[in-house]
Image (cartoon, grey):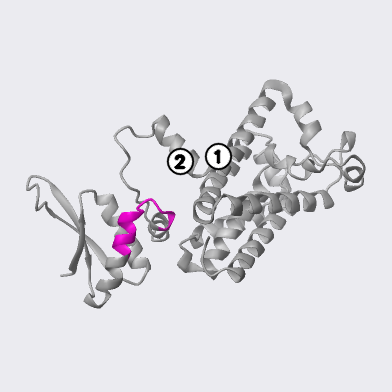
Amino acid sequence: MGQPLIAFNQQSAAHLLANYLNSQGVTASVKQQASSQQPASSEFVVLIDDAEHTVQAELIAKDFIANPGHPKYQQAAWDNGQNVQLAASPSGFSVKHIAANAISAPFTSLVFILCLLVYGLSLLGLFAPIAQHLLMQPFGLLAENHQWWRLLGPAFIHFNALHIVFNLLWWSMLGAKIERTFGVTMLIIVFIVSAVISNAAQALFSEPVQANLFLFGGLSGVVYAVMGFVWWLGWLRPSWGVSLPNSIVGFMLVWLVLGFADTFFANVLGVNMANAAHTAGLITGCLLAAMLSLGSKKPG
């Protein structure tokens, strides 16, 4: 039988801590038993198998109690194939709860809202004027008119519901992970650098249409960048608590390769894939992660 470490009233909290302990090399499990304070109810005890790890386990438990909402704990559960979260407040997903999440990742939320706003206005018949002001133009023309915001503009334009849902789901998850772990400045850097490079790369492999505009858009270049960023940091700096499961990485890489089958996506999904943007975004995210890893000893 294992050695008791700490007891919780919530089963989810106990499993969240146990998963993280296991990820740190401390073998742990959870046992349900009658509460010592309220015999009519249950408590969930986290047990560790090896007494030699007691000091390490106690330090981890204290850190968990001080900040149970840190993404590294949910990440450990995710890596173990589980989806364990702390119990929600009685009000559930209230306006207050949503607002708190938005405040904790303000830049992630801002980009999310801007993409939704642009898409909503497009549905109301305003796609043409929006595209006229946001889509990329040839580099020679940009050098003349100095409308450099167009290097970012295509990231906010989406062409159908599946396109925007796919991108915003990944952005809200991975962008928030980066922002809460490394701060808003780091995410802004990743967003701007990857958006500029991915849009510029796509322009090099595309032909402009009417009015010297490139007809491509979407947040997917940035999405591949944040995916590459989290993936490589999980590989280079696993102790930082930010990583992606191999299954997710594999899915995104397969999706990237399938993107070169333009006929399939054009016929089935109704969108032409911006393969250069996706590839450039992925490479950019990986390189930014490598630079951060080489230049830092710990996340700021």
Q: Is residue 171 left or right of residue 64?
A: right
Q: Residue at x 88, y 34 (%)?
A: 210
User: 258 above or below 266?
Assistant: below
| Residue position marked by numbered label 1 in the rendering | 109
Q: Residue at x 18, y 69 (%)?
A: 2
| Residue position marked by numbered label 2 in the rendering | 101
Marks 2 and 1: CB-CB under 8 Å? yes
State the image quarter where residue 40 is shown: top left
On whether residue 123 falls in the magenta region, the answer is: no
Q: Position of residue 22 (x, y in %)?
A: 33, 67
Q: Is residue 205 left or right of residue 299?
A: right
- Note whether residue 167 is visible: yes
Most distant residue in the left direction = 39
Q: Position of residue 195 (x, y in %)?
A: 71, 49
Residue span colored magenta: 60-72
Assign the magenta stretch its main secondary structure: helix
User: What secondary structure is found at the residue carrying circle 1?
Assistant: helix
On whether residue 62 falls in the magenta region, the answer is: yes
